[in-house]
Image (spheres, coloured by chain):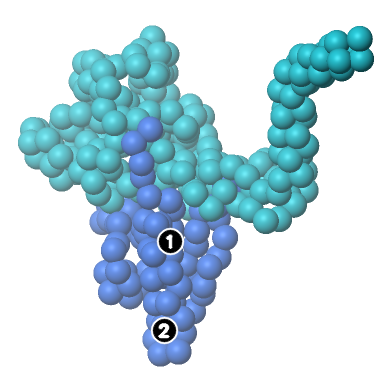
Chain colours: A cyan, B blue
Amino acid sequence: MLLALSACVVVVVALLWEVIAPQLAVWRARRKAGRRRIGNQVVEYDPGRERRAEQRARNLVQSCVNDEEWAMYRDLGFLRVWGRCARGPGDGDGENRRGAPYAYLIYPHKPIVAFVPQTGQLLSEYCVEFPDLDRPYGSARLPDSDDVLAKWMALTGDERRLIATANMHLPGRQVDPVAVRRDLWRLGRWEQARIQREQTDAGSVSA
Amino acid sequence: MRLLRMKPGHGEIVIAEGDVDVPEQEQELIDAFRAQLEAGMWAAVPTTRPGGRREAELVRSFGEVPREADRVIFFPRAAGG
């Protein structure tokens, strides 16, 4: 009788252990994760940090690009960079903007989109990131405007190197082609308005 | 000349600042520049072309930085996304 009772107790304990053990493991893992520190330092929550970082980044963009590009980024949320590699009307130097064979749209934290300026045809997406592996505040992601500026500097400084690093995909993989075409339309309207404004200003000055 | 570095959650920070015509300060700039490259950063010098066009020049050593440049911006090296 005692032997049978002991056997029952052993079986019950074994069955209970099977049920409880996984939950214990999960509980231990959660406890451990809760104690883990990021980069050997406790990062205090600061709700304004990202906003201040983005404001600094925007100031840096403004100080690097010309007035037209800054106004484009401020008003439309992206930058256009003329392509320089292909041989064509622009012949690679980028000076003849009207004849540039292709151009790029730079969005924050989205692929770079290549397109034909004359027709608006989308050519490809170049997926590229600039991850800071130090993760100073727990994230490897640069502020939006720093990401845009990094792409702009890399494209204008060494287009081949950046494009060789990026993963190329057909249009539509990550960026909605409809949205890009709408942005190209917005860009056209924006440029027309800017030209008209400049002509009006020039006319009023000469008068 | 100022050496700036883009930083997540912060924006740019000043890593080093000095006059390239003062040998001690230039050496500090060179050391800081080298440390950033060894940490995997790319370095760019914003420039203005004749006609007002702006662009950047990617540099791989301190010797490639134009002497008259007022800043060098470091950012994490590109990776395929």
Q: Residue at x 53, y 53 (%)?
A: A134
**Which chain letter goes with mark 1?**
B
**Which chain letter goes with mark 2?**
B
Mark 2 element type: helix
Question: Looking at numbered disc 2 in the image, what kind of residue is underneath it?
Answer: Gln
Kindly indicate whether the residue at mark 1 contacts the one at mark 2 (C-beta within 8 angstroms). Answer: no
Question: Looking at numbered disc 1 in the image, what kind of residue is underneath it?
Answer: Ala
- In the image, taking residue A51 as reference, residue A157 lies left or right, namely left
- In the image, taking residue A74 as reference, residue B64 lies left or right, namely left
Of callouts 2 and 1, which one flags the residue occurring earlier in the amino acid sequence?
2
Quarter of the image containing the C terminus of chain A? top left
In the rendered image, residue B77, in percent from the top left (x then y), is placed at: 38, 50
Residue that carries the numbered disc 2 in the rendered image: B27
List the single residue furthest toward the bottom. Answer: B23
In the rendered image, residue B11, in percent from the top left (x then y), is placed at: 58, 51
Mark 1 element type: loop
Near mark 2 (Cα within 10 A), the count class, few <14, some 14-19 or many ≥20, is: some
What numbered label is drawn on residue B39?
1
In the rendered image, residue A123, in percent from the top left (x then y), is placed at: 23, 20
Near mark 1 (Cα within 10 A), the count class, few <14, some 14-19 or many ≥20, is: some
Whether residue A197 is visible to the viewer of this picture, yes or no, is: no
CA distance for labels 2 and 1? 18 Å
Q: Quadrant of residue A96?
A: top left
Examine the rendered structure and indicate whether residue B26 appears above or below residue A28.
Answer: below
Using the image as rendered, state which of residue B21 and residue A21 is in the foreground: A21
Using the image as rendered, state which of residue A133 and residue A116 is in the foreground: A133
Q: Residue at x 26, y 56 (%)?
A: B50
Q: Residue at x 47, y 67 (%)?
A: B3
Examine the rendered structure and indicate whether residue B19 appears above or below residue A135.
Answer: below
Whether residue A157 is visible to the viewer of this picture, yes or no, is: yes
Question: How many numbered marks have been drawn onto this rendered protein structure?
Answer: 2
- In the image, taking residue A6 as reference, residue A37 lies left or right, namely left
